[in-house]
Image (cartoon, rainbow, N blue to C red):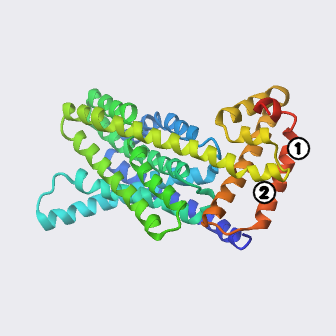
Amino acid sequence: MSPQRPRASALLPLTVVVLVVCGVLSLTAVTMEVGWGGVLPGLALAAVPVGPVLATVLWLDRHEAEPPHLLAFAFGWGACVASLGALVLNTGVSRLLDRAVGDVTNTSVLVAPVVEETLKGLGVLLLLLRQRRQFDGVVDGIVYAAFVGVGFAYLENVLYLGRALGDGHPSSLVAVFVLRCLVSPFAHPLFTMAVGVGLGIAARRRRPLHRAGAPLLGLAVAVVLHALWNASAGSGAATFVETFLLLQVPVFAAAVAVALAARAREARLIGRHLQVYVRTGWLGEGEVEMLASGRLRRQARSAAAGPGGRTAVRAVREFQETATELAFRRDRVRRGTSRPAPEEELELLQRLAAQRASVLGLLPRAGGG
């Protein structure tokens, strides 16, 4: 582990520079098209759905909160790198097709979904490759993919809102804002979540066929959903409403069901893998019961808030996350996707013991044990 930390530290400034440069270039390209009069209001209006969508995504990630810097990278990749790549490649590929086969009018269906979903998916893939310890399965894939999708949608919405402002018709701006920010704020996150599910499955598999096939299948699903969405958006209000109700709403419901099922599976995994620490005296049975239940986790934090305030709540949360990290680590070792590292497990157990000592009086009452 120690040899990897310097490399990770050295990559951080470079990563920030890349994101900032790409973000400036993307914003510059948008500004050149819609002007400052379109960009500045667009930046404000496009931010409206960002908070609620991200809060919904984070609600799914209750067992082991992802590191904020990785979530920031995911959002930045979507808003800066993927958006810049899409601006360049969508235009370039469209021109190549125009020269090769003549006038291509439906590039939003044939070109944009492939380009954009590939670029967004690359951000999630990078997180999987560089931060393997933080990528434990489908839930993590969904969370990171959704953050990438929200970032991409934010910059794209700035462009569309800026164009609507330039039309000089308030009705155009209202229509774009309602459609993109209120009716379909989950569209881009939903598309990219399909890639995230595929990568989450790959993270838990050893067979090369599964590790390559699941992400590719997820990408194909993302491209098809994106293409259908773009096709419906360009086919008139009636077709869009039909597609939204008959396809997008069921797909969204299915995505929520997949996410909830994956989270429930994580809860069972936590309870199963932490039992060994009950037998060895590191944890109590009631504590494992609490750690394997989202409801009891919340109760434990609420019980700690009364006598100890925010400090106690933070201590309970850290205890819960350390225990979850231990469970996920044991699961990775069992599946053979991570090598056994007794010194790492001992370090986590010592941290858990210290955290447990400070909140032990609160947990039994909160967890019912």
Q: Amino acid at mark 1?
A: Ala
Depth order, front residue of 148/267: 267
Residue occupying image coordinates x 33% and y 59%: 115
The residue wearing badge 1 is 357
Q: Is residue 222 visible?
A: yes
Depth order, front residue of 191/266: 266
**At numbered mark 2, what does the secondary structure look like: helix, strand or loop?**
helix
Residue occupying image coordinates x 62% and y 57%: 134
Of mark 1 and mark 2, the one earlier in the sequence is 2
The residue wearing badge 2 is 348
Depth order, front residue of 318/178: 318
Q: How far across and down, in percent of the image, does residue 314 sit?
A: 77, 39
Q: Quadrant of the N terminus?
A: bottom right
- Vertically, is 147 above or below 3? above
Q: Is residue 60 left or right of residue 289?
A: left
The residue lying furthest to the left in this view is 102
Residue occupying image coordinates x 29% and y 35%: 244
Q: Is residue 111 left or right of residue 2?
A: left
- Where residue 357 sits, quadrant-wise, is top right
Q: Quadrant of the C terminus?
A: top right
Q: Is residue 58 left or right of residue 222?
A: right
Rounded to the nearest angstrom, the CA distance separating label 1 from label 2 is 14 Å
Q: Amino acid at mark 2?
A: Leu
Residue occupying image coordinates x 71% and y 41%: 291
- Where residue 236 sits, quadrant-wise, is top left
